[in-house]
Image: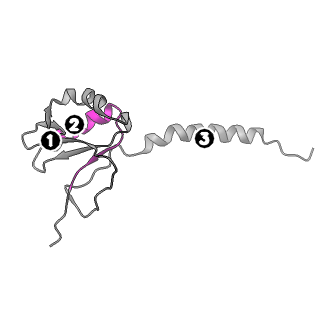
């Protein structure tokens, strides 16, 4: 018989495809972050993103309203237009404790939001 049986080859390729589809999201870095001052250009967006701010006293604000960390996720779900694909910017004062900002970001990320970014100022190059 001179023809090649491709059925086992197709079976192996489908199994590999499924394995890579499951493993690929697990290999990505949790949250891309930027330093407090960078030379990066600002991102262009068509809509105003949701902004969460942590001030020097560790208080958390959603847009301009103070909120407790435990109540961030239900509020975000209620006001986000794109569900879990809503872009969320986290702004932290440079003097605030790193752990506080990470706790806020961890809470948002654990809830399933995957478009989280840190806001920075442009670095002064003078």
Q: Secondary structure at mark 2?
A: helix
- Where on the picture, by quarter, is residue 4? top right
Q: Nearer the viewer, mark 3 or mark 1?
A: 1
Helix, strand or loop at mark 3: helix
Query: Horizontal and vertical percent for residue 120?
Result: 21, 54
CA gap, disc 1 to disc 2?
Answer: 9 Å
Q: Residue furthest front?
A: 46
Per the image, the residue denoted by label 3 is: 17
Residue tagged 1: 54
Q: From this view, report whether residue 125 is shown above or below residue 112.
A: below
Q: Which residues are magenta?
A: 99-120
Q: Are marks 1 and 2 in contact (CB under 8 Å)?
A: yes
- The foreground one among 83 and 31 is 83
Query: Which residue occupies 16% across, 39% down?
Result: 100
Q: Quadrant of residue 67?
A: top left
Tell me where residue 122 sits by quadrant: bottom left
Q: Is residue 106 left or right of residue 19?
A: left
* Badge nearest the viewer, 3 or 2: 2
Identify the image quadrant of the C terminus.
bottom left
Q: Is residue 126 left or right of residue 3?
A: left
Mark 3 near mark 2, Cβ–Cβ under 8 Å? no
Q: Which mark is on residue 104?
A: 2
Q: Secondary structure at mark 1?
A: strand
Q: Residues within 10 Å of mark 3 (few under 14, many from 20)?
A: few
Residue 105 covered by magenta stretch? yes
Residue located 60% across and 41% down the image: 17
Q: Tell me which label, 3 or 2, sits earlier in the chain.
A: 3
Left/right placement of residue 103 relative to residue 17 reads left
The image shows residue 61 at horizontal and vertical percentages of 15, 37
């Amino acid at each position: 018989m001179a023809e090649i049986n491709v059925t086992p080859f197709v079976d192996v390729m489908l199994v590999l495809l499924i394995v890579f589809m499951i493993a690929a999201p697990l290999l990505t870095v949790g949250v891309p972050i930027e330093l407090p001052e960078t030379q990066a250009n600002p991102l262009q967006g068509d809509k105003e993103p949701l902004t969460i701010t942590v001030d020097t006293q560790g208080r958390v604000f959603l847009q301009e309203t103070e909120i407790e960390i435990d109540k961030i996720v239900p509020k975000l779900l209620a006001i986000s237009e794109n569900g879990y694909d809503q872009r969320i910017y986290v702004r932290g004062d440079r003097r605030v404790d790193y752990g506080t900002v990470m706790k806020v970001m961890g809470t948002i990320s654990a809830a399933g939001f995957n478009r989280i970014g840190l806001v920075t100022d442009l670095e002064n190059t003078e």
